[in-house]
Image: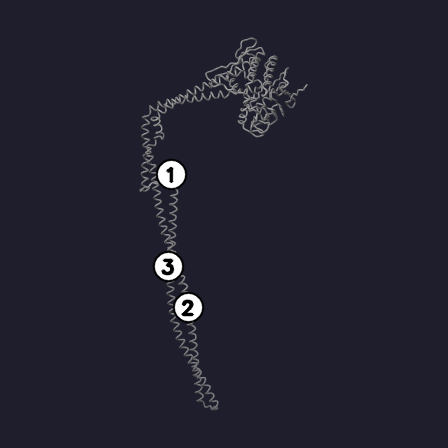
Amino acid sequence: MAKAEEVSEESIPSTMVKEIILENFMSYEYARIPLREGLNLIVGPNGAGKSSILLAISVALGQAYTERSRKLSDLIRRGKDIARVSLIFDNRTKDGRRPIPYSKSDTFMLSRYLRKDGSYWYEADYKEIDKTEVVRLLRDFGINPDNLLIIMHQGMIEEFGAISPQQRLLMVEEAVGFRDYREKILSSENDLKGLVSEEGSLGQLIENANQTIEYWKQIYDRYLEKKNLVDHRRLLESELLWSQEAKLTKSLQSIQDKLSGKRRNLEDLMGQQQKAGDESSALHQKLQDKQVELRKLYGALVRAEKERAKDEGAKAAMEAIRGDIEDLLKSVDDSQLRLDQKKMAHLRELTGFSAGKVKREAEDAERRKGELDREISSLQSELGGVEDSIKKVMDDYISQKVRFEVLAYRIKVTESEIRELERSEREVNEELAQLKPQLEKAGERMVTQRQPYEVSEELKLVSAQLQKLQDVPEEAERIYKDYTGNIEGLRTKLKELQENKKSILKELEERKTVWKEAIQKLIDETTPVYQRVLASVDATGMVRMEEGESIEEAGLLLLVGFKGSDASVLDPYTQSGGERSVALMAFILSLQSRIISPIRGLDEFDIHMDPKNREAIFQMILSQARARSQSQHLVITPSILTVIDKAANVITVQSNRTGSEVKQLVRKSR
């Protein structure tokens, strides 16, 4: 049997609030309230603002409820738009570590801001944090401001007396650190509920499986048919893809073969064109040379003809001169003039000489004319040869030019055909690229002799057959096998589940026993203190656990009797207000040694008590504060106390015309 675990204060990180800072909070414009370990007593007249201090602490700690206001914005000082409450925690190193480890300072400030528009936020050391982080941080210290045993505002002593025993037990469990016991039990109960539900479901499943197995057999047979068709369709889809790939590959190869032939043809045509161009250029040059030669021959012929014409003119002139001389001589002979014989001889000599000279020149001219005639005849013959040669060269040149242009046209056509083939090659490559991802999924290459349209037709037929089986669920095989091959497995699982249920029931009983022992041990430890406090005010009582069928029905009963009467259950109807306050304070004091929160707040616990009881209870508070040096108690009272501990931190609150004023009472040493 498991034993109840001790929850001690030493296992919880310890801290305390060193100071409270109020800014525009309720009646406070600005106040700094120093606190100490042990007892912090806040005193002052009613309405001075004492309770606002505890309320400010609970607001800063994230309490969801305020007894004086439903809206946090109503807590802002009149005329102001924003308020702030800050708690300065002691974060000095203890036993080698800080209570709040992520802060490296000896103090840690937690602030809560309130705005008139209803918004609020938290800051930790001037950095904004989420409320969930605040709750987590406080929970590490066992601080829950909504628990009346930790923060009890004015008037809440009556509320604590009026709550149900079940609520009271929950508060006590949380305050003393027993929350895990209850949560473990509730967790086991939830696990048990789940197992019970699963057990019923398994039993029903086995019963239904036996009744419906024949139905699912028929569905399973159709499922197998569908599965075979699906497999066949998958093969056909793969075959179709590989058939398309083969067709495209064959087409690509044909295109590439044609491309290779066209490119070779283009290369040959370009070679022929180059050769025709070279020959055309050579013929053109030869033609130009012949034309130059022809022009030269024409020049020589013109020159020769000009010289022949010149010689013919000279011959004619000589012939005319010679005739004139002969006529002159004849006329002289016939004339009656009788010249001097000497002069006549001289004249004849001159005319004879001139006639001879003219004759010679005429003969020279005739000779040169003959030569020129022969030269002209030779030139004309040579011109005829050159002209024939030019005509032949021209014919060859035109033939090569025509061949060049024909080759250029054939090259253009071939280049166009190559571009068209290249475009077709790209298109086929693109189709293959688009097909590649599907081929990779299709698996290994499938060799098929069928054309894509043949495979496609069969695929359509298989798809039509599958359409008729579309109502067959995919889980048919699983369900059928569940009903046939796994019924025994379900029974085995049911048996295991029943064994687990027994184990959880045993574990649940053990956890309940641990919880009961822990609660009972707590009651056994607190009851003597409870009775001792009651005895100081002439009362008796006891603490008792009220058990129920479940942990949620269990509660904590307080019994009390005054002035010799038998102890009875504390409730709002049997005892007076003062008696209830005394009994509840006695119980709260009895729990102080087990409460894990280092901070406790109590406001006007004595409002219904007579002076005697008030003083007796206060004496017990002083005693508890002295015994619990590591805890911090904040007690608020409007009463005038005749007994007070010198170690207590006494803070007085007074009201003035501007609001509340706080002063720390400093005792003079004697």
Question: Which circle's residue, 2 or 3, is located before the other in the chain?
Answer: 2
Measured Cα–Cα span from mark 2 to mark 1? 81 Å
Question: Which circle's residue, 2 or 1, is located before the other in the chain?
Answer: 2
Q: Are marks 2 and 3 in contact (CB under 8 Å)?
A: no
Residue at the farthest right position = 670
Q: Is 478 positioned to the left or the right of 535 in the image?
A: left
Q: Which of 3 and 137 is in front in this view?
A: 3
Where 353 sits versus 143, above or below? below
Residue 593, given in percent of the width and then of the height, sits at 56, 18
Residue type for callout 3? Arg
Q: How crowded is mark 1: few (under 14 residues within 10 Å), some or many (20 or more)?
A: few
Q: Residue at x 45, y 21 (%)?
A: 188
Give the residue pinned by disc 3: 403
Residue 217, given in percent of the width and then of the height, sits at 32, 27
Q: Are marks 3 and 1 in contact (CB under 8 Å)?
A: no
3 or 1: mark nearer the eye: 1
**Element type at mark 1:** helix
Residue 478, given in percent of the width and then of the height, sits at 36, 29
Residue at the farthest top position = 564
Residue 557, given in percent of the width and then of the height, sits at 51, 14
Q: Residues within 10 Å of mark 2 (few under 14, many from 20)?
A: some
Q: Which of 378 and 197 is in front in this view?
A: 197
Give the residue pinned by disc 2: 293
Question: Which circle's residue, 3 or 1, is located before the other in the chain?
Answer: 3
**Element type at mark 2:** helix
Give the residue pinned by disc 1: 441
2 or 1: mark nearer the eye: 1
Quarter residue 18 falls in: top right
Q: How crowded is mark 3: few (under 14 residues within 10 Å), some or many (20 or more)?
A: some
